[in-house]
């Protein structure tokens, strides 16, 4: 994930612990163009622009957009 090629996408879904999201965030920003949406279950990204969140049962789903 940190060294391989990421596929082309306009929506990226991740379910990773916060320390991995923090490490992955600059890679996502460099790899994907502005406007790409990122969805994360349970764990947030520290600096991506959050555009929404929804509580589903005991989980929170976060929605971000890369600037």
Image (cartoon, rainbow, N blue to C red):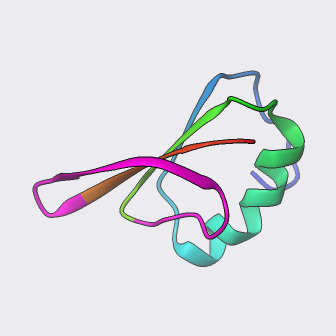
In this view, the residue in front, 28 or 20, is 28
- Quick check: 14 above or below 7? below
Q: Quick check: is 45 in the magenta stretch?
A: yes
Expressed as whole percent of the image width and height from the top left, the position of residue 22 reads 69, 70
Q: Is residue 60 left or right of residue 5?
A: left
| Residue 2 in sight from this viewpoint | yes
Q: Is residue 1 left or right of residue 10?
A: right
Identity of the residue furthest to the left in this view: 57
Tell me the quarter of the picture where residue 67 sits: top right
Expressed as whole percent of the image width and height from the top left, the position of residue 36 reads 67, 30
In this view, the residue in front, 5 or 55, is 55
In this view, the residue in front, 15 or 44, is 44
**Residue range highlighted in magenta:** 43-59
Q: Measuring 47% from the left and 55% from the top, which residue is drawn there?
A: 15
- Quick check: 1 above or below 13? below
Q: Quick check: is 48 in the magenta stretch?
A: yes
Expressed as whole percent of the image width and height from the top left, the position of residue 14 reads 53, 49
Q: Measuring 82% from the left and 58% from the top, which residue is drawn there?
A: 26
């Amino acid at each position: 994930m940190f060294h391989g090629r990421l596929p082309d996408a306009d929506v990226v879904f991740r379910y990773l612990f916060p320390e991995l999201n923090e490490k992955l965030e600059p890679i996502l920003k460099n790899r994907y163009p502005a406007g790409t949406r990122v969805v994360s279950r349970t764990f947030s990204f520290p600096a991506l622009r959050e555009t929404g969140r929804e509580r589903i049962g005991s989980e929170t789903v976060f929605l971000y957009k890369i600037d």
